[in-house]
Amino acid sequence: MKSSRTYKPSEVKVPGFLPDISDVRKEMARYCTSARRLDEMVGEILSELAKTKNTDDTIVVFLSDHGMSAPFAKSNCYVESTRTPLIIRWPKQIQKQYIDRGHMISVVDLLPTLLEAGGLPLQEKSDGCSFFSLMKGEKQSGRDAIFAQFHHIHGRNPYPMRSIITKDHAYLFNAWSDGERTYRAESMAGLTYRAMKKEGEKNPGLAKRVYHLEHRTFEGFYDLRKDPFCLENLLPYKDQGAAFKLGNEALKMLRQKLRTWMVEYNDFALEAFDQRDSPKALEQFMKDYIERSGKEVESMKPYEEAKRYRF
């Protein structure tokens, strides 16, 4: 099934975390064409559901597993890596075209939500919590932050990352970043990354952005009210007196919240996080993690070959 429309580069809107240059527009046009095709395929599925006369009794959930395959999106812990579509249709139960922009939820919340919606008992222990009340258009307290983690790309170098994102700020911890390791992922294989790299040869600002994409810093802190696309890491300026006082308080709070979450879920990166100011400790953590993750990848290969499925 082909898309009913092929978008032109001039028609698309370039996301704010990417530069508005020719080849980026070309890739975004392809992305929009693909998304159009996906939308139409979903429509076909819903049409088949309607034929069964079970539309009113079926909860339909549409979501993606990560952001678009573009630099600073897929395989990362940035806002654009974790902000994905979530559309739920349940006729006569959820108000048509209702949009909630005031709460933050995570995919781990889906199971308890669907259990509650179906009138089934909730699990005694769950990583998420139900947002069923939000589906009904109600308010729900305590939904003011999400946590994200990334371990490693299959068959490639590991890039352990953690983040906490609120509506106002984002804090990232990149245990792998030492100024020398280079980040490589599928999201950098398309036109966009190559265009950014080439344009950076004559644009110092974009060259800096590309360098950050490739090397990062072991910590990142962003004010999403002024910088929703995480373009400027504020940590280099955290000691500039009163101008950063409020931001410094937010930074401390996010670090503490992230640490509490890591303790609760027994995160293996906790020790590295607690020693994040020690390059020697971080390097030892990475050495141990690279060895361990490599063994895990190798141990899965017989299963993958037998099942013809790759994790």
Image: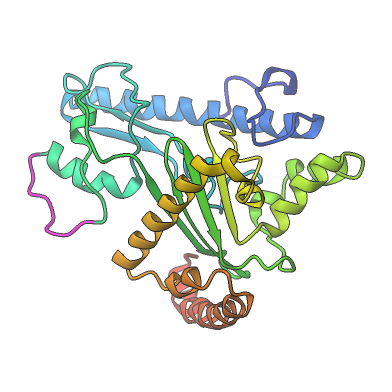
Q: Quadrant of residue 198?
A: top right
* Residue 285 part of the magenta-drawn span: no
* Residue 121 part of the magenta-drawn span: yes
Residue sitting nearer the eye, 190 or 82: 82
Residue 80: x percent and y percent? Answer: 54, 40
Above or below, 303 relative to 139:
below
Q: Which residues are magenta?
A: 119-126
Query: Is 39 situated left or right of 68 in this image?
Result: left
Query: Is 148 situated left or right of 51 in this image?
Result: right
Main secondary-structure element of the magenta-colored stretch: loop
Residue drawn where x is 54% and y is 25% of the image: 36
Q: Quadrant of residue 101?
A: top left
Residue 204: x percent and y percent? Answer: 86, 42
Residue drawn where x is 66% and y is 46% of the image: 71
Q: How many marks?
A: 0
Residue drawn where x is 28% and y is 16% of the image: 96
Above or below, 95 relative to 283:
above
Query: Is 80 situated left or right of 187 in this image?
Result: left
- In the image, farthest residue toward the right: 202
